Amino acid sequence: MSQNLDDERFYVFDWDAVFDVDDYLHFYEDTLRAERTEHQVDVLVSHLGMTPGMRVLDLGCGHGRHAFELARRGFDVVGIDRTEGFVELARREAEMARLPIDYRVADLRTLDEDASFDRVLCLFDVFGLHRDEENHDVLRRISRALRPGGKLCLDVRNRDWMVRALLPVTILQKGADLMIDRHLFDPVSGRLVDYRILVRDGRTREARFSVRLYHFTELRALLASVGLHVTEAFGTWDGDPIGLAHNRMVIFAEKDD
């Protein structure tokens, strides 16, 4: 029996449920803590050769943790996110700190900038949420948004690690609250599908989503196809090499002149 290569089950994304602001920050608070953000920004500044005053685009900025820290260090930052609740939080924090960050509610797929930025960031699984042709177009739009010689940091999951170490079920507990994730990897589409159940304050709800997982070589070729050549790549934010022992890929690329 032949397999349906366009099976819609593998492209599901309950956006509002997955990115419910209150639940998201409740369960991911430890992952997003301030000291980790500061370390990641240290790495970005070093490996992207960033100097204060550069114009930086933070795609999928969420509630603005990287954008805020970059603005605090003197960078001219634009943050874009599709979830209005995150952008509202980010704007409030920036206003309280009197930081001039330009936050916008927008979809990555509508990015329309022409050589406007010195650096672009796309971090923490923001890339890969859409279909292959849309993901490729996002990279094309990123390349177009960069000035000649501009640089990108792309932070995604490592497909090789995920396929090797994927657990059928994971449970994250926060006090009496639970986030239960049931995983399915489809090797034809290359997508990881997550059937999530959230149990919080006696309330249960579901949130389904999927993300495209890439091999490093595949992603390097995609970047090259839009005029971005990889200069460095790591398996962790601490500089470890990409490999089966690490679940992420932190990739730095430069736009051809």
Image: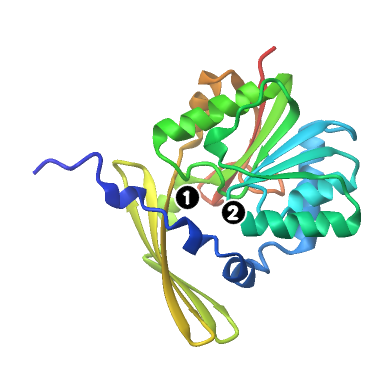
- Asked if residue 184 shows in the view, the reply is yes
Q: Residue at x 60, y 42 (%)?
A: 106
234 or 157, nearer to the observer: 157
- Asked if residue 217 shows in the view, the reply is no
Q: Secondary structure at mark 1?
A: helix
The tag on residue 138 is none
Q: Residue at x 19, y 42 (%)?
A: 4
Q: Quadrant of residue 187?
A: top left
Vertical relation: 218 (above or below) 28: above
53 or 38, nearer to the observer: 53
Q: Position of residue 215 (x, y in %)?
A: 46, 37
Q: Quadrant of the C terminus?
A: top right
What residue does disc 2 label?
83
Q: Quadrant of residue 227?
A: top right
115 or 122, nearer to the observer: 115
What residue does disc 1 label?
161
Q: Secondary structure at mark 2?
A: loop
Q: Quadrant of the N terminus?
A: top left
Vertical relation: 177 (above or below) 135: below
205 or 50, nearer to the observer: 205
Does residue 189 appear to the left or right of 153 in the view shown?
A: left
Does residue 195 appear to the left or right of 238 in the view shown?
A: left
Which numbered disc flags the more N-terminal residue, 1 or 2? 2
Q: Position of residue 202 (x, y in %)?
A: 49, 87
Residue type at mark 2? Answer: Thr
Vertical relation: 81 (above or below) 27: above
